[in-house]
Amino acid sequence: MTSAANSSANGDVSGSQQPDCAADLNELLKPIANLPPEDQLTALIDSGLTESEALNSWKQLHSAPELTAPFVQRAETPDGGQELYPWVQLSGHRENFRPGLRPGTVLKLLCPCEADCLRQLTADPLLGEFVPRYFGTVRLEDGTEFLEMQDLLAEFPGCTGLMDCKMGSRTYLESELDGDPKPRRDLYNKMVEVDADAPTADEAAAQAVAKPRYMMWREQLSSTATLAFRIDGLQRLMASGRTHPVDLKRLRSRPEVSDTLAGFLEGRPDLRDAYLARLRKLRAALAPSEFFALREFIGSSLLFVHDQSPGHACVWMIDFGKIRLAPGRLSHTADWLHGNHEDGYLTGLDNLIGLFEDMQFPPSEPQ
């Protein structure tokens, strides 16, 4: 699972087919529009569609640019059966993920550093409960290697809220600033999509931007620079079937971030309380952790998930591909100066906790 939304909900899944006619699709979707999302997918499959066809139809029902559901997953139910649900991806390359080899797991393209971190964190007495369980690595028939880990959405097949917060005051490794990185056209295109005036004259002439320059610009644009975390991806499945609209790339001020978090919580104090309890528990676990103190946490996120059940919400640490051993113990709160390897992770977590603590909801109206 990764995190900022960047794919179309209506994009084709390889090998899938769409119903022949939009009118036929509308007739097919009409009877299931008011069902819970996980039941909608099952109903589409029961209607005779293949899983790929059902998934594409389900995505049309929940049409939103932030939503990417590359495949159907299966979770075990308490009675020993299986429940189908769309595996939702907030960002990243869809080819990096595949369905797991067993219910409740997902495959992610192998990064040896991430696999090593997950292996250690899964067994860590303090942090083990805050990360996806790690089940080892697998090699597929085409030779591609993946790590197999717990699918965090398996406990939330009816997920109505999903958010990725990239933690820290810095999202690049110090080593990425060294040498002479090659300018990249794709990063230039991403930059001008947000701000056509951002590139320098030389960058505009070359139509390319070096990765460190792009990442530092991206951080100054967002709350990474102001709060030591930023919301990188957000999906809120509302009654209308559309996600909560927000321009994540330009969220920078505390009030803007607070408003976005409040919208994500759907006006529900039960979600605020559940998330706040989990964040405080994570903060208490990180403080004495040797694993955390001795490592530079770069590019790691917190994944927030909830559904419509009262208080059913959770937060996990994800994305460990840039975690590196530091030369010494880190505070994770000190300002970063090149060479000290500080990342601001705890500063961001403290700010996130503070935003949840300050959040107020109007009293519920009498029924």
Image (cartoon, rainbow, N blue to C red):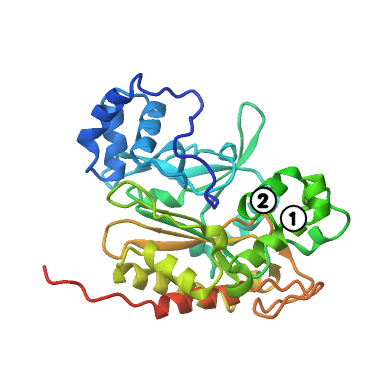
CB under 8 Å between discs 1 and 2: yes
Q: Locate residue 349, reporting x and y percent.
A: 54, 73
Q: Earlier in the sequence, mark 1 or mark 2?
A: 2
Figure check: 304 above or below 169: above
State whether residue 280 appears in this view: no
In this view of the protein, which residue sits in the foreground, 280 or 339?
339
- According to the image, label 2 marks what residue? 192
Q: Residue furthest right?
A: 179
Instruction: Classify mark 2: helix, strand or loop.
Output: helix
Q: Amino acid at mark 2?
A: Val
In the image, taking residue 17 as reference, residue 132 lies left or right, namely right
Instruction: Classify mark 1: helix, strand or loop.
Output: loop
Q: Amino acid at mark 1?
A: Pro
Figure check: 308 above or below 125: above
- According to the image, label 1 marks what residue? 199
Figure check: 126 above or below 239: below
State whether residue 199 appears in this view: yes
Q: CA distance from mark 1 to mark 2?
A: 7 Å
Q: Locate residue 195, reporting x and y percent.
A: 64, 55
Q: Locate residue 288, reporting x and y percent.
A: 59, 78
Q: Locate residue 65, reporting x and y percent.
A: 46, 44
